[in-house]
Amino acid sequence: WYRHGNHGFPTVPEKSYYWFKKAAEEANNVRGLHFAGCHLLDGVGTEKNERLGIHFITAAASLGSDVGCYKIGDLYYEGMHGFPVDKRRAKHWLSKIFDGSCTTKDLTQKCRKKAEQRLNCIDI
């Protein structure tokens, strides 16, 4: 709620990170892992730590988060945050969004469409 200022809560990145990290560490919560990882990756509400951020996001993706799979696939597709451009690995992660591997579904329609378009462009 602190992430976007929902339900009457103010937007407070530090509190958002705190609660996502707490959920990730104490409950191994897939959403907490992903969003705490994004905060770390971009240095929002906490000190930037790309290595730990990628670790959290990869853990979320491995546990069935469609947004985690999307993010890792996107990092490989674009070659961001130290990831090499690797279409094969991008395809691996983006395909999980559609093949039934993801049990936690939080990906927006816009991102699903983008993932589908990227998969259609990968010729491997």
Image (cartoon, rainbow, N blue to C red):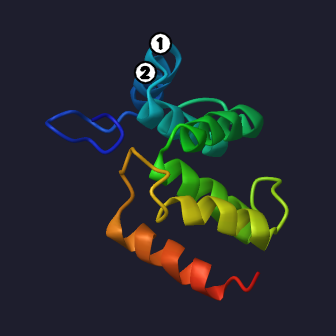
Where, quadrant-wise, is the C terminus in this rendering?
bottom right
Q: Closer to the camera, 82 or 104? A: 104
Residue at 49% across, 43% down: 64
SS for dot 2: helix
Placement of 74 over or under 61, stated as above or below: below
- At label 2, counting other C-alpha atoms closer than 10 Å, the crowd grade (few under 14, some 14-19, many 20 or more) is some
- Specify the farthest residue to the front: 100
Image coords of residue 92 (percent x, y): 67, 62
Q: Is residue 54 left or right of residue 4?
A: right
Residue at 66% across, 30% down: 47
Residue 44 visible from this viewpoint: no
Q: Closer to the camera, 56 or 6? A: 56
Where, quadrant-wise, is the N terminus in this rendering?
top left
- Residue 20 image-quadrant placement: top left
Image coords of residue 44 (percent x, y): 55, 39
SS for dot 1: helix
Residue 24 visible from this viewpoint: yes
Residue at 36% across, 51% down: 105
Q: Closer to the camera, 37 or 17? A: 37
Q: Quickly name the residue at label 2.
A: 23
- At label 1, counting other C-alpha atoms closer than 10 Å, the crowd grade (few under 14, some 14-19, many 20 or more) is few
Q: Quickly name the residue at label 1.
A: 26
Image coords of residue 63 (percent x, y): 53, 37
- Residues at discs 2 and 1 in contact (Cβ within 8 Å): yes
Q: Is residue 13 left or right of residue 51?
A: left
- Specify the farthest residue to the left: 8
Image coords of residue 99 (percent x, y): 49, 62
Residue at 50% across, 52% down: 101
- Residue 12 image-quadrant placement: top left
Residue type at mark 2 is Ala
- Real-space CA distance between mark 2 and mark 1, rounded to the nearest whole angstrom: 5 Å
Q: Closer to the camera, 34 or 43? A: 34
